[in-house]
Image: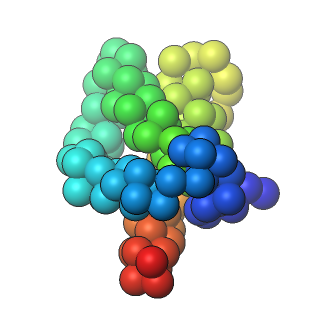
Amino acid sequence: MAEILNVTSAMEMVDNDDELYLSLLDSFVNGIEYDINHLRELEKQADLIPAAKYVHLLKGASLQIGAERLGEVAMKLENTLRGKEKGDIASLTDSFITAYNATLNAISEYQKHS
């Protein structure tokens, strides 16, 4: 299973620029107003594409900061919402929320020690 926050991988993407990486983490935590309740509401609609797009937003941002587990779960949820894969949306959403919260906690811990 992927790491919650793969700092090594993320740092490679930003040419080991600590300041840039910290800025990306700050943007992930404070710049993306991500509302899990909004996602659940979107999933209740007949058209699931808006929910898939909402998940896609966080998927890209998570991969950029090395949040591998969140990125993987987001990809599976997005593909299921788009009908590209089969899966239980409610269960995937629960896993997505768990991974999102774990990512926020990992970021907080990393920022405390940086």
Q: Quadrant of the C terminus?
A: bottom left
Q: Is residue 107 visible?
A: yes
Image side of residue 87 versus residue 24, left or right: right
The structure residue drawn at horizontal position 38% and vertical position 24%, both measured from the top left corner, is 53
User: Colour scheme in the image?
Assistant: rainbow
Tell me: residue 43, above or below residue 101: above
The structure residue drawn at horizontal position 26% and vertical position 46%, both measured from the top left corner, is 32
Q: Is residue 71 visible?
A: no
Quadrant of the rendered structure where residue 58 is? top left
Percent from the top left, x then y, of residue 69? 63, 53
Percent from the top left, x then y, of residue 37? 25, 50
Tell me: residue 107, above or below residue 58: below
Instruction: Report the residue that reaches farthest toward the bottom.
Output: 113
Tell me: residue 106, above or below residue 48: below
The structure residue drawn at horizontal position 57% and vertical position 17%, both measured from the top left corner, is 83
Q: Quadrant of the N terminus?
A: bottom right
Percent from the top left, x then y, of residue 17? 51, 53
Instruction: Report the residue that reaches farthest toward the right.
Output: 1
Residue closer to the observer: 46 or 1? 1
Residue closer to the observer: 71 or 15? 15
Quadrant of the rendered structure where residue 49 is? top left
The structure residue drawn at horizontal position 34% and vertical position 55%, both measured from the top left corner, is 23
Percent from the top left, x then y, of residue 78? 52, 29
Image side of residue 35 versus residue 12, left or right: left
